[in-house]
Amino acid sequence: MLHEDRPVCILGLGLIGGSIMRDVQARGRRVFGWDRTQSTVTKIIDDGFDASNDCSAVLERAGEEDALVVIATPMSTVGTMLDHIAHHAPTCGITDVVSVKQAVIREVRARGMQDRFVGGHPMSGTSHNGWDASQTGLFTGAPWVVTFDNAPTDDSDGGRWLREWMSVVNLAYDVGAEVIPARAQSHDAAVARISHLPHVLADALAVAGDKGGALALSLAAGSFRDGTRVAGSDPGLTEAMCENNVEEVLRAIEEVQTMLDEARASLRATPPTVAELADAGHRSRIRYEARTGKRPVLRLHPGDAGWVDQLKQAENLGARIEVF
Amino acid sequence: MLHEDRPVCILGLGLIGGSIMRDVQARGRRVFGWDRTQSTVTKIIDDGFDASNDCSAVLERAGEEDALVVIATPMSTVGTMLDHIAHHAPTCGITDVVSVKQAVIREVRARGMQDRFVGGHPMSGTSHNGWDASQTGLFTGAPWVVTFDNAPTDDSDGGRWLREWMSVVNLAYDVGAEVIPARAQSHDAAVARISHLPHVLADALAVAGDKGGALALSLAAGSFRDGTRVAGSDPGLTEAMCENNVEEVLRAIEEVQTMLDEARASLRATPPTVAELADAGHRSRIRYEARTGKRPVLRLHPGDAGWVDQLKQAENLGARIEVF
């Protein structure tokens, strides 16, 4: 890991963008950003940070300083942000922090900007949003997925993409995160199963409990409380996750539906049983528990022969990488 | 609430039966019990409690002392326990602590013992089983459902059933629980939604995550951890709950299936959306949170005119009752 002096320019200073800004500045690295809301910008400046709500000016400065531009706005505005970057900072490296990756890469490719784009997904959040919820240390030990779909198969771009990739990895290291390489489709399929599906099931369970009326809610205890917890978060986040990851979420829901179909069939049998699902669920949870906090580590030197294969291997293992 | 000196005889001294024994003895009330495992019985006696593994002798003593007999064995052995009670303690009042109520009442009615039976379900547990996991205070503030399906419509039994009902309510009070009256079908429908369904969904989610491989498990965070937590408990418990409450669990799963069908259809639409489910789930969870810790209270005098209607009202409200 190399110390990097390249400034960071963050577009969107909410929970994620704001927390990145706090950590980067705390490391003594130059960081500035844009937010669309003037009152938020005023607050940010009062808090001692460098922010503006003039997007063109911020991006022109990013271009002059060769900053790494971080798109930290919702998926629905990523295309617009890319257009602004193309216009005002036509040479800057770009990353993003959106919770889906294929949809972002589609927008990037539609504009031919893939040679300077590396996707990211810092997987850390709280149930609160906005600059006021941002904090230092939010990403300490958290996974930060970095994509490598656009890795060139030869050195035709003179190492341009590799430089951007390293810059994004260093940003993640600067805020204390663990870097997990994954291609966009692998990432989206994984988060559909372990993040988007849990939200959908929590919502369905919450409704099913509620339909049981006052007696059901009165008797609800730990299993219902934990199973519905994320239904308490902003439904707009669930919508944004699922609606930008439709194919993978559909696949995950269909798998659950198949399991529930089989469970119902075996419950209707004589004698009734749910042993298959209960045993499989238990084994799966035990495997998950056994892995928790024990992410494998893979050391690699970016640009070495076969290094992209090492990234694929790390993706396959869910490993974090250390670069040297 | 009356202080009651009637001894308590507990059949099955695992987590629930053992914890009841500890609390009842701590109150200075006579309690003794049976467990089928001699080594467990030896341990219980060493711990200063009155236990035996001679079921006939224990029940004959229960008959002599007019004890309240508590069936604290798994559902699969309830019929056998009732046969033993019919034979060795033909006049004792009976309750149980099984997590389903219709299946127990069917066994009771099949033996014509309903005039001296009142079902119970203390809703407190840990992820551990057996006497070694039992503890004082396990039921403090926990809901303890007491059934009233067998309440006579007149006084033809000379108040026999009412006496047993009061005895079960007093037992729940003695261990610090909150008494929630509910008929067996209402109870089973409620727990299918807020306890059995959460286990089924946790299992399905755990499997869906596991099928995502190492990358998915590596990225799994709070939503997956909480959504699968109960899949980590003994799968035998999930099986016992669901397999003894088939109709209600099927109904709950079918409701979830319908919601998931609708969510998939709306995700396939243009533009894709899951707003309906996400919003409904959020509203439901907020309603649940608003109720948590705020169970309504209904005061009643057992045996008064209309008191069974008051029990029905409490069931409908999910209220705890105070008797005077």
Image (cartoon, coloured by chain):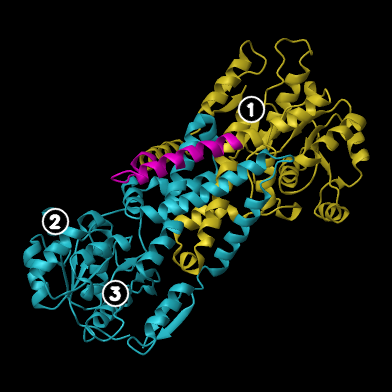
Chain colours: A yellow, B cyan
Q: Nearer the viewer, mark 3 or mark 2?
A: 3
Q: Secondary structure at mark 1?
A: helix
Classify the position of the N terminus of chain B by image quarter. Answer: bottom left
Write the start and end of the magenta stretch as one range. A250-277
Q: In the displayed structure, does residue A282 sit left or right of residue A212?
A: left
Chain of the residue on which disc 1 is drawn:
A
Horizontal and vertical percent position of residue A247:
64, 33
Residue A10 falls within the magenta-colored stretch: no
Residue B36, label in figure: 2
Check disc 1 and report the residue beneath it.
Answer: A185
Marks 1 and 3 close (CB-CB < 8 Å): no
Residue A276 falls within the magenta-colored stretch: yes
Q: Amino acid at mark 3?
A: Asn
Q: Amino acid at mark 2?
A: Arg
Check disc 3 and report the residue beneath it.
Answer: B150
Q: Give the distance between the C-alpha atoms of the residues marked 1 and 3, in whole angstroms.
A: 59 Å
Label 1 Cα neighbours within 10 Å, binned few <14 / some 14-19 / many ≥20:
some
Q: Secondary structure at mark 2?
A: loop
Query: In the image, what residue occupies the spot 32% across and 54% down?
Result: B244
Horizontal and vertical percent position of residue A172:
67, 34
Q: In the displayed structure, does residue A211 sit left or right of residue B234?
A: right
Q: Secondary structure at mark 3?
A: loop
